[in-house]
Image (tube, rainbow, N blue to C red):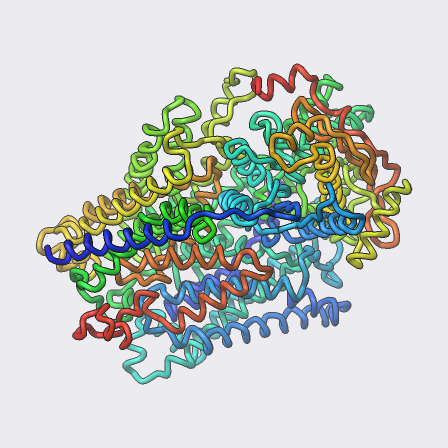
Amino acid sequence: MRSSKAFLTTTGAVAAIAIAAGVAFGPASAAAETIRIGDINSYTRLPAHTVPYRQGAILAIEEFNRSGGVLGRQLEFISHDDQGKPGEAVKVAERLFARDEVALISGSLFSHVGLALTAYAKKSKRLYIAAEPLADALVWAQGNRYTFRLRPSTYMQAAMLAAEVAKVEKARRWATIAPNYAYGKDAVAAFQKVLTQLRPDVEFVGSQWPALFKIDAGAEVEALKRLEPDAIYNVTFGGDLAKFAREGKLRGLFEGRLMVGLLTGEPEYLDPLKDEAPEGWLVTGYPWYDIETPEHKAFVAAYRQRWDDYPRIGSVVGYNTMLAIKAMLERAGSTDTEKMVDAMEGLSFDAPTGPITFRAIDHQATMGAYVGWTALRDGKGVMVDWKYLDGAGYLPSDDEVRKLRGGQ
Amino acid sequence: MADFIVSLLTGLSSAAAMFLVASGLSIIFGVTRIVNFAHGSFYMLGAYIGYTLVQAIGSAAVGFWAAVLIAAVAVGAIGVVMEILLLRRIYRAPELFQLIATFGVILVIQDVTLWVWGSEDLVGPQAPGLKGAADILGKPIPEYDLALIAISPLVLVGLWALFKLTRWGTLVRAATQDRQMVAALGVNQRWLFTGVLFLGSALAGLGGAVQIPKGGADLLMDFNILAVAFVVVVVGGMGSVFGAFWAAVLFGILQTFGIQILPNSTLVLMFLVMAVVLIFRPWGLLGMPETLGQAHPGPPEQPLRPALPRVRILGGAATALLLALPVAHLVLPQLVGAFTLVLVIEIMVFVLFAAALHFIMGPGGMVSFGHAAYFGGGAYAAALLVKFADAPFELAFWAAPVGAALLAFLFGWFCVRLSGVYFAMLTLAFAQIAWAFVFQDMPGSVLRTFGIADEFGAPLKITGGDDGLNDIWPSAWAGTRIAYYYIAVGLSVAALWIMRRFLYAPFGYTLRAGRDSPLRAAAIGIDLTRHRWLAFALSGAFTGLAGALFLFSKGSVFPTTLEIARSFDALLMVLLGGVQSLFGPIFGAAALTWLNDLFSVLSYWRFLLGVTIIALVLLLPQGIVGFAGTRLGRRLRLARPEEITA
């Protein structure tokens, strides 16, 4: 009994002291001179994909600051790791807003992390510009006033590929291979939907679902061969793609078949394969080495000078995200969240990859993707015969989008 | 027929890497009883070191195989360094404590590898002389696959000869069967352990190096192989090399044919098989029951005693500080920022999670490797109720502990019949099955096959796969940061107090009796299985409560809340805090969550965290609360003077 009393007495005493101390000092306010942008990305979980993003973003911020900043204020880029965990990302967002007093947050690569931040942005009524996550739900089923997305989504990129392969007459029997998680499932579903609309005669004969980054490539290749398809749609990437490409070649899977790869042409995925990069696949990607527009050449030159490395798709997405933020701040004229959101809706700006607009209807940007064929050049994989497809042409109708957003 | 044979060979070749890694893990565990989490990191290092060596000297066949062997020896040497500098100093710590030391090693190796080899995936070159495909009944199969198929039986025969024909091997086998007897006969255990660590690590390194031509090296390899290696070892029987071999062959073949029949089964197949094997053969295919006296090498635990007055006063002060914090935030925002409250909420969630795990792990002696199933399972129960029944926050919140308790009740029925590492692995298997259930949205898939659609005509999603369930927040009254803070702190403190009451009640004493002496407890008429089962379900309920607090503070739930890494987080918190004290999990969870937040804003934070964990392990081998037992702690009257320090 005596010790319970001791417990309660101390509890009361400490609480009183803490409150008294608080009253004595009282609140104060601090004004931020620079405009701070909070960046959240999976820097330890997937550094090969996120570090180029950060480098592109930092390049843009440094360029803005050299030319006098935005609204007469310098920009500050505060970057934190989310460890690839959605819960951690939400905590980092709270830290950025509460402790670092950032005006908005941007970034992320994993879809589930992006979706967690989407829900957080809606609840806290703070602006979140999703840079790289591909999940369709981010702007549709889970879309909300405070969330915008730059990169072309799973649906858009799959639709671009489907529209291209619909022209290939002989490809009737299709098989698919995709990592066994939401991105893989969405990518296959979108491809199937668009392709069967354009070509009612095609048939999907089977799907393989290897676990992400744990592919048993030999077994998957044998399973695909048994399906005897005319064409194969591949969504695997990273180490899985390397193993799949090697086994498929050795085991003769690709011979006489049309191969299509989502994101396969992005330098992040193609370059590690070196001279074993698949040839003659139709892919979406980023042929930075052959894009001849002056804006893009200037971007590549600046990037190489700053980082002594060539740009990846993440780099240009990071750069474009910061361009969007700059254009938005100039349009809003303030860092008030509601004004920034209003400025984001319908915002148009020019990027190294071409003009981009953030659609007011679903907050998806019209940034497009490069579609072309893989080939080997100087012992490494490149994209040839490519073209840039503007994202605006590969989105569902406005009615469908409204339905998907559930009247938000 | 040709297809069948090609598939069979493909399965056998993927068994090779599994066998090499698993046999090393099995040997290390068999002799030292250390659950070596760093084993996956050794596999990864084998791949990276092998890659570099192959680039340097591997253009011809001789050079290639020399590079593979050198990589294996180099990794073996790293294992020896870990044993001498780290593990040797903590063999007398409580069971499984070495596990966190090896976890610290994982973190350090991750960042060192990133620093040395860079972030880009390294695609391995093909093996010289084995670049093409062989023709088997008119079907192509890579030549290197045939080489791999040959390697594992070779290694198996080599290990068999080593164990059967050398004196060292005889000692290793003796130590696997009865370590204490070997020590009593005057064998120098230190060098035996060092040698075993070398052999086991070298096998992991070899496994990593031989798979270079099949893939290469990347930074996710360590965790990807770890779970697989444990499954193979456990299904084969801990400590049995032949068991590991047959289990690897079984999984290699099952995987190949499973993928053709059920392409969706890739995530869950291994764990389903492990669960079935453990239910029918609780010690794996070729394993032996754990001999008595091996499970607890350290001195017996002290009985639980009421806390000392000084400890109570400190506990009261801490509670008061927690309660006063929001007030301090309101009047002194520059000193106590809003984020401090957010961080304290997170700490309290994990304190509750760790304490609930400790409830069965400490007093119950049941080490669960899969407790995230009840954390995430509870969160999903609440989230599903909100999403599909529009349940209000006040009701949905309580669905989490109830749902988690039911889940623990179900899984527990199978698990509590096992003990030791087999218990741990069965909980892991069930957690993985639960994870795959939400990750693949199994209920949603069933509905979709019947063509059931949602109100917009889109295919119905239930758990939403890894896109999770989003936008789930508390009611308005509880939604402010301060209100939610008081909910989180109040419920966690209340739950901690209730758990403490349980453990000081006859129920808790019974649990401890069963842990320390199952035979005697059974002899006086205690139904141990039932008590363990009930404790497991109770622990599940409290874990689910933590899951609910987590869900409503984050606003969304994803399969990551059920994944292995989350289970291990809780395990680390308990072990780091000190498994022998009820305060251990509180300190462990608070310290790890706080350190994680402190370091994660820095680059190479994993290295820092890993080094900090290793330092704590070396300084306080009884966990953080072990401080109370030090001379300083006693002088501060945090522990009774007469208690024995281990």
Q: Position of residue A338 (x, y in %)?
A: 61, 30
At x 71% / y 33%, what residue is drawn? Answer: A152
Name above or below for residue B517 compared with residue B532: below
Picture coordinates of residue A278 (x, y %)? 78, 45
Residue drawn at the location 65% of the way across and 17% of the way down: A400
For residue B239, which quarter of the picture? bottom left
Left or right: where does residue B152 sit relative to residue B337?
Answer: right
Q: Quadrant of residue A212?
A: top right
> Residue shown at 26%/74% (left/top)?
B646
The residue lying toward the viewer, choosing from B467 and B273, is: B467
Q: Is residue B423 visible?
A: no
In the picture provided, is A362 more to the left or to the right than B586? right
Given residues A49 and B528, the one toward you in this image is A49
Residue B585: x and y, percent? 32, 56
Where on the picture, by quarter, is residue A291?
Answer: top right
The quarter of the rendered structure image containing the C terminus of chain A is top right
Residue A114 in view here: yes
Q: Quadrant of the N terminus of chain A?
A: bottom left
Q: Residue furthest front?
A: A24
Outermost residue on the left side: it is B524
Please say if B179 is above or below A85. below
Q: Is residue B188 positioned above or below B30 on the image?
A: below
